Amino acid sequence: MQQKKTNKKLLLPIHPKLAETLLATELGKTYFLETERGMKFSDNGIGNWFRTQCDEAGLPNCTAHGLRKAAARRMAEAGATNQQIKAMTGHSKDDEVALYTAAADQVRIAEEVMKKLSV
C-alpha cells in the first residue's frame, strides 16, 4: 500500500482472520474497495463510507483513523517494539508512535520490564 499523506510505500502482511474474511467477501472488480458504482473511493469518500458503516453497526465513536490508533495500541500491548509498530503503521518517528500507544497497558508492560531487570 502507499500512504496518501506521505507517499510512503508499505508492504504489509494480511492478518489470517482478515484474509479469511476477504476470501468470503465479494471484493471490487477493479479496486479492493469500490463505490456502489464500481469506482475508486475519493479520500473523503472512504472516510464518509466508513463513518456510515460504523453508525449502522451501532458504533458511533469509531472512525477509520481510530482503527489505526487502536491497532497501534494493541501492538504495544502485545509487546511490539516502536520499530515494529512503525513498520506496520508507516510512522517514521518514535514520538508519533507514542501518541498512539500512550494508552497501552502500562501495568502489564511494567511487569514485563521488571522481569527483564530481574534476570
Image (tube, grey):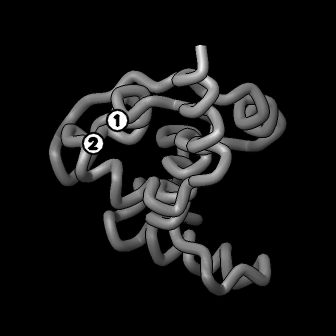
Identify the element where label 1 is drawn. Answer: helix
Mark 1 Cα-neighbour bin, 10 Å: few <14, some 14–19, many ≥20: some
The quarter of the picture where residue 15 lies is top right
Residue visible at 56% across and 78% down in the picture: 51
Residue 84 coordinates in the image, percent (x, y): 42, 27
Q: Amino acid at mark 1?
A: Lys
Q: Eyeballing the image, is 47 above or below 26?
A: below
Residue 82 seen by the camera: yes
Tag 1 residue = 86
Figure check: 22 above or below 67:
above
* Residue named by callout 2: 91
Instruction: Decide: few, some or many residues near mark 2? Use Cα within 10 Å; few <14, some 14-19, many ≥20.
Output: some
Q: What residue do we see at 31% from left, 38% from top? A: 90
Please say if 35 is above or below 31: below
For the C terminus, give its image quadrant. top right
Query: Label 1 vs label 2: CA separation?
Result: 5 Å
What kind of element bears circle 2? Answer: loop
Closer to the chain start, of discs 1 and 2, is: 1
User: What is the three-letter code of the residue carrying label 2?
Assistant: His
Q: Is residue 76 left or right of residue 21?
A: left
Q: Residue at coordinates 39% horizontally, 41% vertically from top-left? A: 89
Which residue occupies 44% across, 30% down? 81
Residue 105, label in figure: none
The answer to which of 44 and 117 lies nearer the viewer is 117
